Image (cartoon, rainbow, N blue to C red):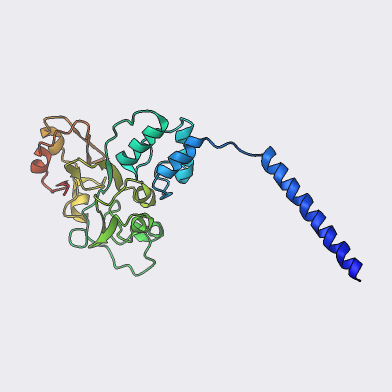
């Protein structure tokens, strides 16, 4: 009996030794060489893994930067400070990029937007595609106020205030998660420095838009006709500002009869 125990112990030990040798050889043979700069870049990144850069987390971006497939300022969360650190690692200069911030193109809160009916169902913006008129609000283009964007934001930078989403521009990291989460496609990335914004997403004709919301853009084109920099165009009854041309003169704000253009605070 004692000899049987010894034999079993030796057999198990031999199997363990064989498996260990096999795994060791396999690890050497199939080892993937990691670019040392990739690890340095990864350590420099904030580690939020938000995907705002377009890659599968920080490790994906680090690999792309190390391989020269992504710019050193590719992390929207880290911004300029992180870009400068990574530029030093890669031995290049970081290109100056304009800071961006999310903006919700809607003023249709509980006081300004009309409602067609009361809704007591699931509080989820995506589910509104399955209810009458795409939701209880008369405007089919406005913020539904059920917070899909809030749930998607990892930085507590967006909240529902009086029935609509509002972005805290100083907390926003421009990761773009709220843009993806909004089924109405009314969240845009705009320059942080932008002063005047069209706070409406309605493409309805003027009379229809006015009935739905007090501050709807009615496509009157007064802003576009009076803009000295020709920075505004009106398409599908909705004004849009070209921030590369805008000179912050404020003429559009003064001319808009429905106050659809606002000053960003």
- Residue closer to the observer: 166 or 37: 37
- Residue closer to the observer: 74 or 37: 37
Visible residue check, residue 63: no
**Residue 50 drawn at (x, y percent):** 41, 49
- Residue closer to the observer: 196 or 258: 196
Residue 57 vs residue 204: left or right? right
Total numbered badges shown on the rendered structure: 0
Rendered image quadrant of residue 256 = top left
Residue 120 vs residue 9: left or right? left
The residue shown at (43%, 33%) is 70
In the displayed image of the protein, which residue is found farthest to the top? Answer: 92
**Residue 239 drawn at (x, y percent):** 21, 40
**Residue 171 drawn at (x, y percent):** 27, 52
Q: Is residue 168 above or below residue 4?
A: above
**Residue 123 drawn at (x, y percent):** 36, 65
The residue shown at (38%, 52%) is 181
Rendered image quadrant of residue 1 = bottom right
Visible residue check, residue 82: yes
Q: Is residue 4 above or below residue 21?
A: below
């Amino acid at each position: 009996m004692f000899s049987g125990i010894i034999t079993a112990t030796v057999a198990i030990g031999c199997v363990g030794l064989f498996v260990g040798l096999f795994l060791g050889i396999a690890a050497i043979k199939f080892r993937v060489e990691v670019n040392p700069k990739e690890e340095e870049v990864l350590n420099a990144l904030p580690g939020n893994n938000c995907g705002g850069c377009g890659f599968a987390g920080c490790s994906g971006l680090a690999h792309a930067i190390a391989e020269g497939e992504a710019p050193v300022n590719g992390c929207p969360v880290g911004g300029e400070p992180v870009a400068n650190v990574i530029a030093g690692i890669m031995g290049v200069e970081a290109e100056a990029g304009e800071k961006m911030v999310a903006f919700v193109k809607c003023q249709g809160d509980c006081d300004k937007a009309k409602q067609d009916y009361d809704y007591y169902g699931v509080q989820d913006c995506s589910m509104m595609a399955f209810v009458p008129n795409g939701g209880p609000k008369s405007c089919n283009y406005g913020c539904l106020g059920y917070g899909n964007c809030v749930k998607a934001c990892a930085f507590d930078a967006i909240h529902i205030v009086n029935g609509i989403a509002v972005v805290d521009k100083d907390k926003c990291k421009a990761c773009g998660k709220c843009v993806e989460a909004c089924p109405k496609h009314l969240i845009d990335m705009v320059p942080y420095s932008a002063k005047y914004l069209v706070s409406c997403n309605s493409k309805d004709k003027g009379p229809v838009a006015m009935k739905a919301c007090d501050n709807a853009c009615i496509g009157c084109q007064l802003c576009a006709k009076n803009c000295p920099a020709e920075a505004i165009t009106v398409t599908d009854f909705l004004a849009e500002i070209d921030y590369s041309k805008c000179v912050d003169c404020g003429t559009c704000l003064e001319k808009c009869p429905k106050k659809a253009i606002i000053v960003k605070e």
